Amino acid sequence: MKYLLGYDIGSSSIKAALLDADTGRCVAAATSPRQEMAMQVPQPGWAEQDPERWWQEVVNATAELRAAHDFDPAQLAGIGITYQMHGLVLIGHDGQVLRPAIIWCDSRAVGLGNQAFEALGEAHCLENFLNSPGNFTASKLMWVQENEPEVYAQIHKIQLPGDYIAFRLTGQLQTTVSGLSEGVFWNFKEQAIAQELLDYYGISPALLPEVVDTFAVQARLSATAAHELGLAEGTPVSYRAGDQPNNAFSLNVLQPGEIAATAGTSGVVYGITEAPTSDPHSRVNAFVHVNHTAAAPRNGVLMCMNGTGILNSWLRRMVGELPYDEMNRLAAEAPIGAGGLLFLPFGNGAERILENRPTDAELLGLNFNIHSRAHLLRAGQEGIVFALIYGLEIMRQMGVQVTTVRAGRANMFLSPVFREAFVNTGNVTLELYDTDAAQGAARGAGVGAGVFASPAEAFGGLERILTLAPEPELQAQYQVAYQHWKQAFSKTLYNRHEAVDAVPAKSLLSHV
């Protein structure tokens, strides 16, 4: 018997999944910690975490997994890693972390990225990087260079969060082409490091780690890590990918026209294209997908909405720490449109679909005589869906065909209200599968270690558990609610940007 182990390095928790490689079935899963990990916010708009905390929770989750299913570590054929994207971990020459990680929802580098976008030329950036440098990892590194020169001077290599966990597992400092692209370190046109961006920022390419294939025996478990985890020294680490490319992979979304979605810490719709494509305003971004090759290019077009899981957890605190399934039940008691109560769920850092502009969350239309907890919870779920559909409309304008969307049975897709709103507002068919990110990472490890001959072979045990199609009567009701939401969103956006910019952002307002 062979097993495969997957780790999901999230900003809320660390998840681990153990798969039986012969059947493709998950035999054990673990999450650590039980309560969500905190983000440090030293200043408004900043978000940091301690990478050492991630590692300790990897150790804890592994111990919990081994307690749940007793297996021989010698039977572990591969380890895969998926991780929160766009973070920045700085490693010194002694292998130590130099400062807290600047994570995905940190907004401090927006201004630097916007300056680079203008200086290098918007057309050049979109043609070559498919993105504005924006708030991505390269711009965060530039922020450190400008604001913490004493830290910058000590950097040996930079790492993405998943690269760092792989480093702790193996002692090797590595990354992937997909990882480079998520940091806007990759030139799609040249299929090489984005040297012009490094030159503009004054960043030495020597700070970038060794590049390895996404599916490959990248390195092996060190004696030190094996001792901490209770696993076998020499076990291959054979896959790593950012959370959204991996979520797509976990749903067998690999070919042009296939679409994946997730609604966990962030809300995402992710579609595969063959030809490089970009949004003129960089509200939707493109990265190298996990199965990309020069002969068969595969890029992932990603729209991301930050204020997803954090809104749901905030609502949970506001309604008395109810279990999430009880919150979902209550939300279903309110009518479609939540009795006119509206949530604009933008309150967790700069939102890319709003051109990285700072926009707070807002609750609109509250009537003390009408609205209950049920209305509040439904408005929250509908607000997240409406923001996702707003981004989905941008993807469609880019030529991404979206008719069927696959998602895992997890997070907000557990809610019948959320699923119904998503399907009927977006006019899409939803396929729900019994999988998650950690399981996807385990399947990827099987491909990289040669347990599976191809990515397609890795999905023998993937089970579709629900298909939900739009219903005309519900579509009509949700369209009324969505148009109401967009009108309120447009008015709020116009007022705010009139005050900030004197001239509102036409690309934003013309869309709504």
Image: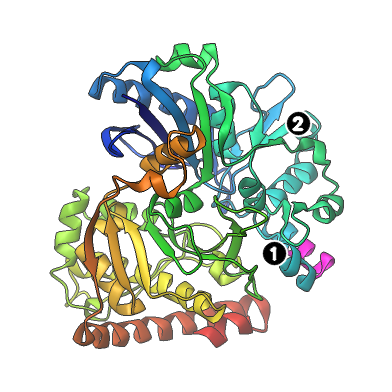
Residue 188, image x and y in percent?
A: 71, 59
> Type of residue at label 2?
Ile
Q: Residue at x 78, y 42 (%)?
A: 145
In the image, is 11 to the left or to the right of 436? Answer: right
Q: Which mark is residue 70?
A: none
Residue 97, image x and y in percent?
A: 64, 27
Question: From where the camera sits, is residue 117 visible?
Answer: yes
Question: From where the camera sits, is residue 376 visible?
Answer: no
Image-quadrant location for residue 288: bottom right
> Type of residue at label 1?
Ser
Image-quadrant location for residue 287: bottom right
Q: Secondary structure at mark 1?
A: loop
Q: Which residue is mark 2?
A: 155
Residue 182 among those drawn in magenta: no
Q: Residues within 10 Å of mark 1 (few under 14, many from 20)?
A: many
In the image, is 81 to the left or to the right of 35? Answer: right
Residue 54, image x and y in percent?
A: 48, 31
Q: Quadrant of the N terminus?
A: top left
Q: Residue at x 31, y 39 (%)?
A: 24
Q: Decide: marks 2, 1 in contact (CB < 8 A)? A: no
Chief secondary structure of the magenta portion: helix
Residue 338, image x and y in percent?
A: 23, 76
Magenta part of the protein: which range? 114-121
Mark 2 or mark 1: which comes first in sequence? 1
Q: State whether residue 469 is above or below residue 345.
A: below
> 384 or 167, which lies in front?
167
> 24 or 452, which lies in front?
452
Q: How is the image coloured?
A: rainbow
Q: Which mark is residue 132?
A: 1
